[in-house]
Image (cartoon, helix red, strand yellow):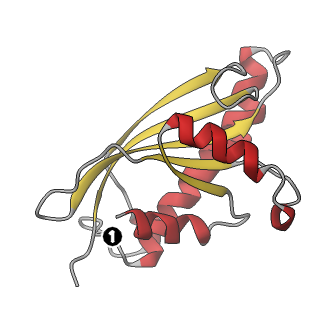
Amino acid sequence: MIDAIKYSVEQMNPEPRFIVGSWLEATKLNSILSYDKTMDGKKYPLVFLDSNFETDKSETATVDLYFVARSKESYTTQQRESLVYADILTPLFRDFLYQAFKSAKFIFENVENARDYYAEYTTDKMYYAPNVLNDIVDVLHVNLQLKLKLK
């Protein structure tokens, strides 16, 4: 499941950082990655997969994905909605869903073409002050049910 999700993230354009683990691991790794020369120290956007999920016998799992973008403490709610959620995080999530569909690694029920893809999910918008990732960020938390195609 993790490899298939990672593959979908790697197909996104522009490619966000991808981290799997706990929030503590994400904080440490994201701090280290800020010195990564291949990404010019760019930490965001970030797709974080909480590794605390189980895959059942049918290769179905409900995962928690967090789409993270830098924000500003001075932003009003309206600015965050338009400048971060509408312009960055929602398109990032939609691109992930599209790439997951296009990868053919997941089963999407009753879908005949890329425009019709759909997956069961719920979202939450969250604002994280600098205590979680040591940065001021906005987060689109997506609880998403994915089913792997069996080989």
* Quarter of image, res 69: top right
Image quarter of the N terminus? bottom left
Left/right placement of residue 40 relative to residue 82 reads: right
Residue at horizontal 57%, vertical 24%?
126
Determine whether the residue tagged by mark 1 lies in a helix, strand or loop: loop
Front-lying residue, 29 or 53: 29
Front-lying residue, 51 or 60: 51
| Residue 42 picture location, percent across and down | 82, 52
| Residue 84 picture location, percent across and down | 73, 35
Question: Which residue bears the numbered disc 1?
Answer: 106
| Residue 144 picture location, percent across and down | 36, 47
Does residue 96 sit above or below 131 in this rendering?
below
Q: Is residue 103 visible?
A: yes
Does residue 79 sit above or below 108 in this rendering?
above
Residue at horizontal 76%, vertical 29%?
135
Left/right placement of residue 41 relative to residue 70 reads: right
Residue at horizontal 78%, vertical 14%?
76
Left/right placement of residue 62 relative to residue 40 reads: left
